[in-house]
């Protein structure tokens, strides 16, 4: 039983009156209406429709007159699938605002209705089945009150409620809907753009595909376009932490991630600086970190990855990230991805000559290297983790999404859902529960969810036809300039050149503070590289085709190295392939790398360690840190015991 009293909801339960959240917990029911009212669906001003807001969805019925057969259909938009929401009123003729008290008698200029726009990106089908998010603007008109101002007041109540839910702030009843509960200021990000990464489309990718989504979410940003090697490292070492503590976004491949992390570690306040979370838009060739983040939250990272990465930036939250201290005779750096020697490093570096192929360069480079297979002699010593079983992959719990859009191999549907648990959204819906799609051809990013109006990039856009009137942080209506939208992009100019494959800056991040007080000192398990390892380390020596020591789930968009890896387990995965091995075996393994099933092959040995030392004994070869080539020779590394970074990834709900 539901009773309503002066703006608050009280729910009757056998234990007595309870709040909305407690009612859900006791009854298991999630679809309690927070708000409900009559609107019309823009551009139609015809039949009123009932719109309902719950903590999980916005739903309404499509008017019968718009459907064949005279049937109505409930349309549901998941809150998780929204990037943002805005309110507004129609523009006057030629886009000029018309004052209400001087409005003409035409319907366009005298419209007292207030409008609310939902920026939605629902999945067409589950991502493991090849589904992608598709852009959708859904606009409702409210006109039950006698003046525009009164109608806007109602609309703003809805906007604030939705904004609270998007910020993961609980809304139990109507009295919870206050702008004062929203963050005191908008999120602000520092965006590094590498214009030469991948296929040299970094600026275009950001301006056309990322900035509009950030604007829809009300996220502010400053941009830096890198013009030389270590430009991002320098900027990160001197950036204002307080100004950009919400996060750094990197529009590039993994090379710029490497620069930014080491730039933060170059600072005197490094312990605080590395707490600034990092997000990535996959605009490079490898895109390992971007793929790992998308994989972790259940997003499709192989199709439409740029949109998906931009979309999850709209969600608040971060996750700890293991940082790895790596030492050689000539440098000391912080790593986030992997150390590689042998076939993986060879493919990564030698495929640079095929960069024009984009991500396909790795596949082509792998084929070339396997045909001319090499082997290397060396010694690997490592400090094992206390309980390796905590990190070993269970075959019965693994799923393998195929590159084919229509086929996924898995043990059963329930395991699949458990493995890729994510926030409530269209991802979790079965195929027959998803909105129907029309058969007409669609331009890119066109959304044609059955029951919603058809809109594409070249057609209606809310900012083109409406003056936005959102609330500021104090709960007052704000009136953005007519240039609102992409005008927030501040791209600097320069004469960019592609980043070198070498690390360039060999200056080592100082791992203790300069004051000598011990505050901010980074602990270490490593002896000096010239000294023997402790007696509790274990040793392997022999001929190897390759060794990769990874601490990320992906080595690139197409290489899943550690399928169940989170970001902060505090250990390394040492994966190696010893001689002898055939070329056919190597080809089979390269294919298995695409879904992580290589770990279960008998040829691949997997160890879990806290630290390691690798001593190549073959005269020449390639060593890489995070895909960047370094001087060939002994190398050692460890998971830093008392320091973690952060990645931008949605918080659990």
Image (tube, grey):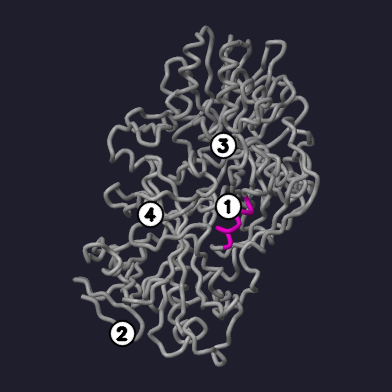
Chain part drawn in magenta:
206-215
Spatial separation of the CA atoms under disc 1 and disc 4: 22 Å
**Residue 126 coordinates in the image, percent (x, y):** 37, 45
Residue placed most toward the observer, 280 or 487: 487
Spatial separation of the CA atoms under disc 1 and disc 3: 20 Å
Tag nearer the camera, 1 or 2:
1
**Which residue in the protein does label 4 denote?**
425
Assign the N terminus to one quadrant of the image.
bottom left
At horizontal 60% and vertical 44% (from top left) the residue drawn is 644
Label 3 Cα neighbours within 10 Å, binned few <14 / some 14-19 / many ≥20: many
Tag nearer the camera, 2 or 4:
4
**In the rendered structure, which disc, 2 or 3, sits on the residue that comes first in sequence?**
2
**Residue 37 coordinates in the image, percent (x, y):** 34, 77
- Residue 209: image tag: 1
**In the rendered structure, which disc, 1 or 2, sits on the residue that comes first in sequence?**
2
Q: Is residue 423 above or below residue 23?
A: above
At horizontal 64% and vertical 36% (from top left) the residue drawn is 335
Q: Is residue 216 above or below residue 90?
A: above
Q: Is residue 314 magenta?
A: no
Q: Is residue 111 above or below residue 480?
A: below
């Amino acid at each position: 039983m539901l009773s309503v009293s002066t703006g608050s909801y009280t729910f009757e339960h056998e234990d007595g009156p309870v709040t909305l959240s407690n009612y859900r917990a006791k009854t298991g029911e999630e679809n309690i209406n927070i708000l409900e009212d009559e609107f019309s669906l823009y551009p139609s001003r015809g039949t009123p429709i009932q719109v309902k807001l719950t903590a999980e969805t916005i739903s309404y019925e499509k008017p019968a007159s718009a459907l064949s057969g005279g049937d109505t259909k409930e349309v549901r938009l998941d809150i998780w699938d929204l990037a943002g929401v805005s309110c507004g009123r129609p523009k006057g003729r030629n886009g000029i605002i018309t004052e209400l008290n001087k409005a003409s008698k035409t319907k366009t200029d005298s419209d007292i209705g207030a409008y609310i726009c939902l920026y939605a990106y629902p999945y067409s089908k589950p991502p493991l089945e090849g589904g992608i998010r598709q852009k959708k603007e859904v606009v409702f008109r409210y006109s039950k009150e006698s003046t525009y101002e009164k109608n806007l007041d109602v609309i703003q109540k809805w906007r604030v409620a939705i904004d609270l839910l998007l910020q993961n702030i609980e809304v139990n009843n109507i009295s919870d809907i206050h702008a004062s509960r929203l963050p005191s200021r908008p999120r602000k990000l520092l965006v590094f753009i590498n214009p030469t990464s991948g296929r040299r489309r970094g600026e275009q990718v950001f301006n056309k595909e990322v900035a509009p989504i950030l604007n829809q979410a009300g996220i502010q940003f400053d941009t830096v376009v890198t013009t030389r090697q270590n430009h991002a490292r320098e900027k990160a070492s001197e950036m204002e932490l307080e100004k950009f503590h919400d996060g750094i976004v990197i529009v590039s491949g993994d090379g710029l991630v490497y620069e930014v992390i080491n730039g933060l570690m170059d600072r005197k306040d490094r312990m605080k600086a590395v707490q600034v979370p990092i997000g990535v838009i996959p605009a490079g060739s490898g895109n390992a970190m971007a793929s790992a983040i998308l994989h972790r939250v259940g997003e499709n990272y192989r199709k439409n990855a740029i949109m998906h990465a931009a979309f999850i930036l709209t969600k608040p939250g971060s996750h700890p990230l293991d940082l790895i201290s790596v030492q050689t005779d000539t440098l000391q750096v912080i790593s986030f991805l992997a150390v590689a020697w042998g076939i993986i490093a060879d493919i990564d570096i030698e495929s640079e000559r095929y960069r024009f192929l984009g991500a396909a360069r790795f596949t082509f480079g792998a084929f070339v290297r396997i045909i001319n297979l090499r082997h290397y002699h060396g010694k690997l010593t490592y400090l094992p983790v206390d309980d390796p079983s905590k990190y070993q992959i269970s075959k019965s719990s693994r799923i393998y999404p195929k590159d084919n859009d229509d086929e996924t191999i898995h043990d059963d549907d329930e395991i699949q859902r458990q493995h890729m648990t994510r926030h409530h959204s269209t991802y979790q819906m079965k195929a027959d529960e998803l909105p129907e799609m029309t058969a007409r051809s669609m331009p890119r990013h066109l959304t044609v969810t059955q029951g919603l109006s058809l809109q594409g990039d070249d057609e209606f856009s809310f900012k083109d036809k409406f003056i936005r009137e959102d609330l500021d942080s104090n709960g007052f209506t704000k009136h953005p300039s007519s240039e609102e939208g992409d005008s927030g992009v501040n791209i600097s100019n320069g004469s960019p050149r592609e980043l070198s494959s070498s690390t360039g800056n060999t200056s080592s991040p100082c791992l203790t503070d300069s004051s000598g007080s011990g505050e901010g000192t980074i602990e270490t398990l490593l002896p000096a590289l010239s000294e023997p390892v402790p007696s509790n380390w274990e040793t392997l020596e022999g001929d190897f085709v390759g060794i990769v020591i990874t601490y990320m789930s992906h080595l690139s968009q197409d290489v899943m190295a550690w399928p169940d890896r989170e970001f902060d387990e505090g250990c390394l995965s040492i994966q190696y392939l010893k001689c002898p091995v055939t070329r056919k075996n190597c080809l089979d393994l390269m294919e298995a790398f695409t879904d992580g099933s290589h770990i279960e092959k008998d040829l691949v040995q997997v160890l879990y360690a806290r630290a390691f030392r690798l001593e190549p004994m073959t005269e020449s070869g390639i060593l890489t840190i995070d895909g960047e080539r370094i001087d060939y020779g002994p190398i050692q590394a460890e998971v830093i015991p008392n320091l973690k970074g952060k990645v931008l990834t949605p918080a659990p709900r």
